Image (tube, rainbow, N blue to C red):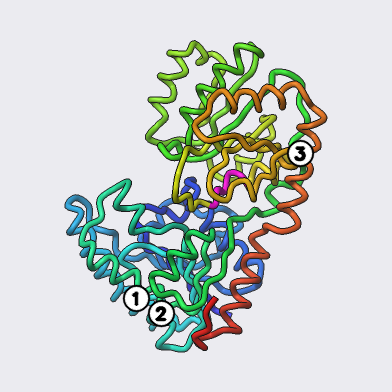
Amino acid sequence: MRVVYVSTDPGIPVWGTKGASVHVQEMLRALVRRGVAVTVLSPRLEGTAPADLADVATQVLPPAPKGDPAVRAKGLLAMNQTVIAALDALAPDFVYERHALYAHAASEWARSAGVPMVLEVNAPLLAEQSAHRTLSLPGAAETSVRRAMSAACLVSAVSEPVADHARQMGARSVLVEPNAIDPARFPNPAPLKAAPFTLGFLGSLKPWHGLPLLIDAFARLRAQIPDARLLVVGDGPERAACAARLRELGCDDGAAFTGALPACRVPAELAGMDVGCAPYGKSDGFYFSPLKIYEYMAAGLPVVTTRVGHLPEIVRDGVTGRVVPPGDAAALARALVVLANDADFRRKTGRAGRASVLADRTWDGVAERVIGRATCGRYAGSAA
């Protein structure tokens, strides 16, 4: 089988270190392990592919124009013609696309060619772009999203809210597939460590990830366990503010930031943690499928997260970690104190989480389900 993987989002470097980049790479690995020949189409192919993906073929798309947002949007819309030409030349047997704004060519090409196709949707991009960036040419953007969703053979959505969004945009067949892990990256659970107790955070440091709340909870934790440490694996726009807050609270001596790391180095950093934290804030429309939570669990770490959206379904309170109210630094600190003082509970919850993801949430499993569903459904127009 010849598969073309399409990723036109100019903010996602295919070989990068951000969560979206890791997601792309993990799906590529899952496809390669199925023995298919994969070609990646993307405007962001700079850098070096991981060694196990070095044989994946690539074809670079034109870069999105920089500067004026409207000009950039028009450039992304024009990229649809380039994608069509590339797919015509490659003539794949299967198309897999990571949904991006202004991109609809891959879905429509596959539908016209009668080729099975999966459109992976990770967020309601129209709303996300409007809330956090600038949505240029909103009418054209929405039309493009509707064209992509309605033409896709199968939409693979990372959560139920994202699936609902896809249906509202015209998707005919939708499968909910949250994020997952590659067991090969986590062959062994993190060892149970001696002091100091270390809480960890993995991910890009963006406002909605809740790191300021974790820092406030860390300060409360240090009041009871003075040698506790905070390890932040990742980088992002909130780093300077978080570092300043740590200094203000007098806790900067107990915190470390690794900066952005390639995915191959993440498991070793998780092995240095006792607890993995995902302190998301209050949200009426939480739609994320946090990759960090699944990777914490794969590493055998208990997870502390907040009662937002579907997170209590991923982290079962008292079984695979602790779930606390959002925005409550005191409650978060109390949960951390309990975990710091109870090694047996950490061991039990960490093992339960690891067993859960190894059994049910692997990238190979995701690939098998979405390819099987798309290949069986073709363009019969079934709805889910």
Left or right position of 112 against 360: left
Q: Are marks 3 and 1 in contact (CB under 8 Å)?
A: no
Q: Identify the amino acid type marked 1.
A: Arg
For residue 151, the mark is 2
How would you rate the neighbour count of disc 1 (Cα within 10 Å): few for under 14, some for 14-19, many for 20 or more?
many
Identify the residue position indicated by label 1 in the image.
Answer: 147
25 in relation to 353, above or below: below
Q: Element type at marker 1?
A: helix
Q: Identify the amino acid type marked 3.
A: Thr
Task: Name which of mark 3 and mark 1 comes first in the sequence.
Answer: 1
Q: Is residue 58 magenta?
A: no
Q: Main secondary structure of the magenta part?
A: helix
Residues shaded magenta: 289-293
Q: Are marks 1 and 2 in contact (CB under 8 Å)?
A: yes
> What whole-number distance in Å separates the C-alpha atoms at marks 1 and 2?
6 Å
Q: Which sits in the foreground, 306 or 55?
A: 306
Q: Which sits in the foreground, 37 or 99?
A: 99
Identify the residue position indicated by label 3 in the image.
Answer: 349
Q: Residue at x 57, y 84 (%)?
A: 377
Q: Residue at x 43, y 19 (%)?
A: 245
* Residue 335 image position (x, y, % from top left): 66, 27
Q: Which sits in the foreground, 273 or 377?
A: 377
Q: Identify the amino acid type marked 2.
A: Ala
10 in relation to 274, above or below: below
How would you rate the neighbour count of disc 2 (Cα within 10 Å): few for under 14, some for 14-19, many for 20 or more?
many
133 in relation to 42, above or below: above
Residue 137 is drawn in which quadrant?
Answer: bottom left
Left or right position of 271 against 234: right
